[in-house]
Each structure stands twice: as structure tokens, then as C-alpha cells.
Image (cartoon, rainbow, N blue to C red):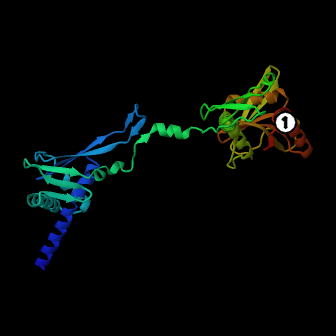
Amino acid sequence: MPGTELITNWLNLRVLSDKVPYFILDLLQQTPSVYVKGLGRFDAIFHPAEIDFGQSKIKPPFIEPGYSDQDSDPTNILPAYIQYASAVSIESSTQSISGFVDKVLSALHTDGAYSIEKFGTFSRLPTGGIRFTPDWDAFNLAFTGLEVLDLKSATEASKVSTPSVAPIPGIPVATVDALSDSTAVSVSVYPTDPLEESPAVIPSDSGMESGIAGNDFSNRLLWIILVLAMALITILCAYLTWDILSNRQRLREMKEIFHPQTSPTVFTEITTIPTDTGSVTTEVHADTLAVAVPESPKTTGEADCYIVVGAFSDPANASRMLDRLTSMNYMGVSLQGGNLTRIAIRTSCEPSSLQQVLNAARTSINPEAWIY
């Protein structure tokens, strides 16, 4: 019903207008001043902590509230803040502020004063202006509970009290001078016989200090050991990385040796035939290993087998290995397969002869020589 809605809106605006002073307090915790149209400007003057060396005291920080009834501040952020904090429209927040101002002015006109709990009191000045007496505890919420710190009393409370000892006849008398908590207590002993005079020193907190120093030394030693261990691990990892990178080509060649390709292999046999005028080198190319290879004088009339002594990607290295086999009176053969050139010794397939040549090749040429 329209009448019911009007009453509900009026009640909501009245409740919201009663909360306007507390919105002002909340906003003063974030901004130095808050302007209220029709009433004046509220200020929050921050005072930092002060050290009074003469009195040996530290005064805590505080907020000093201020008020001016001059209605001339163009800054007006209170309606927007109430809209944000209460989730109402800007019109409702503006109407609630107007209701609060009207309530204050009406009370000042009727009673001459208007008090708001946990905010302050408005009163009318003889000149017609408005005076505001703030509630200091309400405006100092950010620093509530802070008290003046007396350094002198704190120092006296930290001193160690020294008991007095009455002298007893026949027993040495000790005088104790407590310098501070961190120094030793010096005791001078005066026996009855001046010839037996012997000074003594009684430590106060030296045991505790030595324990702390020992813990610090242990911590430093532990850190040093940890840093050295990390450095050693780093050096070891760097060495292993360098070793792997430097032997990458070697590992690739070993992989090709132990995992030969199964595709048809093209090989080239290099044979040196001695003549009266020198030696003639011939090369025989075949598409597969099934092609017959010219017989070696050492294996005439028998099937041929090959003992691979190396696989090379560089033709120069393969040529040097062939020269080495020739100098050792072996029949060197070049087997081309994939990206590598295998250098092998052609020999008889008779088991005992084959094993003998294999053992000799592993002993004098390559420990990882294998039968192809």
C-alpha cells in the first residue's frame, strides 16, 4: 500500500539520520576532515608520538578533534560514503544528512544544546554560532588504550636488587657491586688476617651469556657447513654436466655400435693389392651385406666375417682407423650404415679363428669391438 511504503521509507531515513554522526567518525579515521552541509566541518588532527627527554617519557600518538561552523567547505564526500557503507541511493544518503542537521538545529533552537552519545555535544554560542564539544575517546579510536611510557620506571624495574649482608665476626665480609645485567658482579673479600687477602669475582649472568654465545657459534658453524656442502654439490653437478656434454659424441657412437640399424646397409671395401711398381687400392661398393666381398689372402676358400672396431661420423677418423688396421696387417673394411662409417676387420668365420681375431682386436684396438 502507498501509505505503508511512505511510513517505511520515513522510518528508514530516520534510522539512517541517527547513524550520520558515526559515519562521520568512521570517515575521520580515513580522511583529515569531513564537511556536513548546513552544519560545518569536522576535523581530525593527528599528533605523532613525542619523546620527552627531560621527563624520560614517551607520549603516545593521538587524534585531536576539531570543528568549524563555517559553512563554506566545497568538499562534500559524506553522502557518497554513506551510500557506499549503507548500500542506499545517493538521494537517501543526502536526505539522511539533512535530517540529522535539521534535528541538531532544532534542538539548539529549543534547548540550546544537543548531545550525541559517543560523539559529542552541540551548543549555541552567545554570538549565534555553533560550538561542538567532542567525545575525545570516540575520536581517538585508532589509538585507544595507549598510555604514556615512563622510561625511568622501566629502567628501575629492570635493575637487579642486591640483598644486604650483615657482617659476622670471624667470617669474611664481601662487598657486591652490581654494575648491570650484562656485567659480572665483582666481590672483594677481606678476611680477618690481612696476609690472607684474596679477591674473588662471582659472575652474574655469564653462564647465560656463554650459553647464548655457544648457540650463536653452533648456528654459524652449521650455516658454514651447509654453504660448503651446497658449493660442493654445485661443483659436482657442473663437472658431471661438462663430462656428459664433452662425451656426447662418444655416447652417440657407442649407441650406434650396440644398436646397429636393421635397414639394408651399404658398405665399401677398401683393398690394397701389392704390385711390382707399388700398391693399388681398389674400392668395391655393394648395396647390402649379402654382396660377395673379395677374398682376403688370409681367408681364401672360407666364408667371411667382420669384427667392427669403430664407428665414425668423420671420414677422416675412419680413414685413420683403416690405415691403422693396414699397419697391423689386418684386412680393413669400411661398412657404411646410416650416418656412421663402421671400420671392421675381415676375417674367417671359423669359430676358433674368429674368436682369436676378436680377442686380439679387443686387446690392441678397441675393448668394445664386436662381431658384425
Q: Quadrant of the N terminus?
A: bottom left
Residue 184 visible:
no
Specify few, some or many for label 1: CA neighbours under 10 Å numbering under 14, 14-19, or 20 or more: many
Q: Nearer the viewer, residue 15 or 48?
A: 48
Q: Residue at x 76, y 30 (%)?
A: 321
120 displayed left or right of 164: left
Q: Quadrant of residue 201?
A: top right
Q: Quadrant of the C terminus?
A: top right
Count of numbered tags:
1
Give percent across and percent down for residue 309: 78, 37
Compared to residue 88, the image places residue 360 above or below, namely above
Q: Residue furthest bottom?
A: 1
Q: Quadrant of residue 208?
A: top right
Q: Nearer the viewer, residue 230 or 80?
A: 80
In the picture of the structure, the residue carrying the numbered disc 1 is: 361
Give percent across and percent down for residue 363: 86, 35
Give percent across and percent down for residue 26: 27, 54
Give percent across and percent down for residue 227: 65, 35
Q: Nearer the viewer, residue 182 or 311?
A: 182
Which SS class for mark 1?
helix
What residue type is disc 1 on? Ala
Q: Residue furthest right?
A: 352
Residue 119 visible:
yes
152 displayed left or right of 250: left
Q: Residue furthest front?
A: 169
Q: Residue at x 55, y 39 (%)?
A: 158
Compared to residue 86, the image places residue 198 above or below, namely above
